[in-house]
Amino acid sequence: MSITDSVNEQIKNIVDEVKSLTEELKNVDIAELQGKAKDKAVAAYAELTKKSEELVAAVKGLSVDDVKAALKTYRSKAEEAASDAVEAATEAVEDVQAKAKETVAKVTKKAPAEEAPAKKAPAKKTTTAKKAPAKKAPAKKAPAKKTTTAKKA
């Protein structure tokens, strides 16, 4: 079998598959698919309607006093939580400070009581003769530049 024959065979197979695909598409019942889609849409709409009615009923049952009471409750809970957080932070800071003091105390106890005297750096030799400041020469004035007038064309 030559290359041309194998390519022709592959093309024939592809054409056959396309023909069978069009036949399968002809057999698809569009009305059935539309019915399934409609049923799903109706079910989703019914569920959405039910949820919205529950929400409306809940909102109708609320009064301004209910909202104010809920706000007071949440405000007091927020203040308690903030207060607890401040207390916890304060305690944590105090614990860290106590540990730092303990560490400093341990380190100072371990340090030798007498420290060796620090070695002094050798004194730097200074010369007593001072150099006289150099005199500055007076600044020279730059010669004045000649200005040229524009040439007439």
Image (cartoon, grey):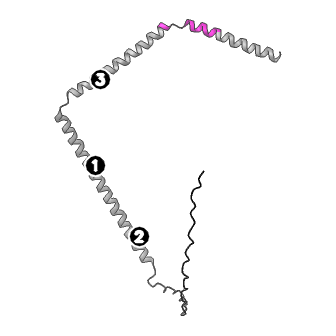
Q: Position of residue 98 (x, y in %)?
A: 35, 67
Q: Quadrant of residue 113?
A: bottom left
Q: Is residue 130 left or right of residue 79?
A: right
The circle on residue 103 is: 2
Residue at point 25%, 24% (across, down): 56
- Mark 1 is on which residue type? Ala
Marks 3 and 1 close (CB-CB < 8 Å)? no
**4 part of magenta stretch:** no
Q: What whole-number distance in Å separates the C-alpha atoms at marks 2 and 3?
A: 64 Å
Which of the marked residues, 1 or 2, is nearer the chain's N terminus?
1
Q: Is residue 53 left or right of residue 38?
A: left
The quarter of the displayed image where residue 63 is located: top left
User: Which residue position holds label 3?
Assistant: 52
Magenta part of the chain: 19-31
Q: Is residue 44 left or right of residue 152?
A: left
The answer to whether 124 is drawn above or below residue 52 in the figure is below
Q: Are marks 2 and 3 in contact (CB under 8 Å)?
A: no
Residue density around tag 3, few if under 14, some if 14–19, many if 20 or more, within 10 Å: few
